[in-house]
Image: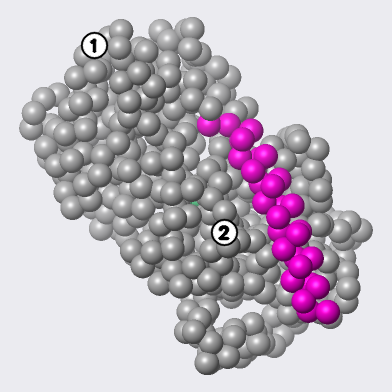
Amino acid sequence: MNILFCAAEMAPLVKVGGLGDVIGGLSRALVQRGHDVRVVIPLYGAIDRSHHQVKPTSVRLVVPTKGKEEPASIWTTTVPGGVRVYLVEHDSYFGGSQVYTANDLDRFWYFSQACLELLGHLPWKPHVLHCHDWHTGGVISLLKSDLRHGPRYRSVASVFTIHNLGYQGWFDYPWAAEAGILGHIPPREHPLHPFLWRTTALGIYHADAVSTVSETYAQQILTPEYGEGLDAVVRHRLEDLYGIVNGIDYEEFDPAADPHLPVTYNIGRMEEKRNLKGTLQAHVGLPTEVETPLLGSIGRLSRQKGIPILVDGIERLLAKGPAQLVVLGEAPAGEEAYEEMLRALEARHPTQVRVIARTDESLARLIYAGSDLFLMPSLYEPCGLGQLIALRYGTVPVVRRTGGLADTVLEHPIMGNGFLFDGATDGADLVRTLERALSLFRQKEQWQRLVARAMSSDVSWHRASQKYEDLYSQAVKIHKEREGTLG
Ligand code: GLC
């Protein structure tokens, strides 16, 4: 099948969070299965053009956006694994060093319009247009409503994937009027009318099929508690809603061949993993103690990630006995308070806690490899990739039972690969679970067996890419039926 992805990030070209990893890993897995997958992303200033061999093409687009016409030049490259990427150049929107900024609605609206324009200029036609998160939800409603390009567009089926319903691309009436999309929103009498003023809602409402990145999150977003104000729109699509758990790229994340690590290891060579623990402790300036359990945590320092639970849980844990914690991640604009909370914890326990507030891929790999346990106390988690990487690196995950964390971590005496807790109000439940984990940690043989099970959990893209194939076939079928009813 021919599939065109439209997204805001793609590893290895540009990655801020899990979205980038998924676009890179899933596209490559589908290419390996024989599909022709191509990806469109913006050409950010942050992308290293010479390193990734990003070259200009002769394609120039005129992009209608909010009553104006703006130019776009298309660049291209093929990333390792054979995925062809098109990059949309517009310097005043994307030329800066930041991937995300304060004016993202207008930037990604322009990008969405450019994706649609590009579709008309490619000497190649996708069977399915696959858009990801709020940045490109609008491409789907534009595709459906914009028949300027005639029947060529009509036969393209669409899939919208929700990676995180917490980010929605809100707009208001004047903005929609200027963008010329009032017709994308059903009339005032329609029960969903009040909810559709967000690009992510347009994607969910108009796509032929909708998916999200785990089975549990697919159930959760049907409820007001997790629906972020869009549960009614999600429920409207219940019949066409799929939950597919993400994988990780086994070549990219491989403890036996990770170029970021000073030494590599595998299930038969675990001595090196123990050495990496010492390397990590020394690197972040914590005492190099082999027996002290070392806990790692990596991710956005945002509300979603349950930082207050983490801080309270660690505070309680340190009152009971020795342990170390390394946290790596940045707070998004407006959520700096979470970084402050962690810094205060570090100030209270300077020889046990280290907080490194930046993104640093090499250090991230050292934390995945060198820690004993990996913490994810998320309030909600559509899928979560950190726990999958931790499993692959033999670092036992301790996670809150929500979303994709509940679907990928199993606590069980014989079959388990990690530990789960429920409490969301404070760290009481987390610390009980950590004590359970640490009592096993002290029983060396049992712990080794648990680590081996973690490392042999299948967290690859293999299963998921088959499920995406089914989803694409389903979307094509739904599209044909819908087209039939349109006449
Ligand atoms: C978002 C979600 C995360 C998910 C990722 C990729 O970052 O918060 O749970 O794993 O997207 O789908």
Q: What is the C-alpha distance between the residues marked 2 and 1?
A: 44 Å
Question: Local crowd at mark 1 within 10 Å, few (<14), some, or many (≥20)?
Answer: few
Asked which quadrant contains residue 181, the reply is bottom right
Q: How is the image coloured?
A: one colour
Residue 485, percent from left and from top: 77, 76
Mark 2 belongs to which amino acid? Leu
Residue 114, percent from left and from top: 74, 69
Residue drawn at 66 percent across, 46 percent down: 468
Is residue 355 rendered to the left or right of residue 256? left
Q: Residue furthest right?
A: 123
Residue 202, above or below 404: below
Is residue 428 rendered to the left or right of residue 466? left
Mark 1 belongs to which amino acid? Gln
Q: Is residue 471 covered in magenta? A: yes
Residue that label 1 marks? 443
Residue 65, above or below 126: below
**Residue nearer the viewer, 161 or 28:** 161
Q: Main secondary structure of the magenta part?
A: helix
Asked which quadrant contains residue 60, the reply is bottom right
Residue drawn at 38 percent across, 64 percent down: 223
Residue that label 2 marks? 241
Q: Is mark 1 within 8 Å of ligand 1?
A: no
Question: Local crowd at mark 2 within 10 Å, few (<14), some, or many (≥20)?
Answer: many
